[in-house]
Amino acid sequence: MTGLRTVGTLSGAPQLLVMLPGVGMAAQAIFDAGFASAIERRGLPLDLLAADVSGLGLDAVDTWDALQDEVLAPARGRGARVWLGGISLGGLVAMAHAAARPGAVDGLCLLAPYPGSRPSVNVVERAGGPDRWQPSEQDLRDPELRVWQWLQRPPPALPVFIGHGTEDRFADRIQRVAERFPLASRHTVAGGHDWPAWLPLWERFLDTGLITP
């Protein structure tokens, strides 16, 4: 297997955030949108990498193993505080990674995270919501439902930023995901499922103080 491809440069900063792009989104697009520039303007000691995961989904086990073994674990091994983030499907993958590897990351930054397909979400809703749903073995063969199992009880000490545009086409379902986290973790801005919402959300994340100066 070839190594995981990333865009960005490691400077040895004490904090690292790895961002996972959405469907059809090149890793470079995160930099083109101004995410790294926003860090530089604030002078934050934060390295930013974007992983090239184009065309891959939740079941790309080798890719997520490589993300852990080649990027996240080495950074933590040198003492960095490591965040995992994602946009749209990348946000769902970030949650899946945290669910499958407890303690692997120090925080999550979820920008308009894809909440799962409607059939998967309907399984949870038909049961009366996440708190009443009791997943079956068959349910847990679905990687999206394994994320929802994790969302039943996310680690209470894990810092999470989750945000979306108020006109996002997935807004109602993203809000159901957001409600699994403390109120202070949830953020909305004007906009849809696109960069004019995602960049302001990223800037708000940088301004929360979760990334320590």
Image (cartoon, rainbow, N blue to C red):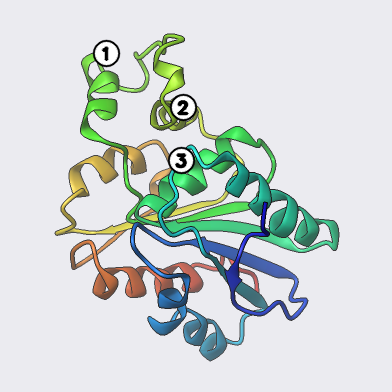
| Residue drawn where x is 25% and y is 67% of the image | 194
Q: Residue furthest bottom?
A: 41
The amino acid type, in three-letter code, at marker 1 is Ala
Residue 178: x and y, percent?
35, 43
Q: Earlier in the sequence, mark 1 or mark 3?
A: 3
- Report, in whole angstroms, how far the alpha carbon at label 2 lies from the one at label 3: 10 Å
Q: Which residue is mark 2?
A: 146
Splitting the image into 4 quarters, where does residue 30 fall? Answer: bottom left
Label 1 packing within 10 angstroms: few (<14), some (14-19), many (20+): few
Q: Nearer the viewer, residue 145 or 133?
A: 145
Label 3 packing within 10 angstroms: few (<14), some (14-19), many (20+): some
Q: Which mark is residue 127?
A: 1
Q: Which residue is mark 3?
A: 58
SS assignment at label 3: loop
Give the answer, above or below, for where 191 lies relative to 121.
below
SS assignment at label 2: helix
- Report, in whole angstroms, how far the alpha carbon at label 1 lies from the one at label 2: 15 Å
Residue 135: x and y, percent?
41, 13
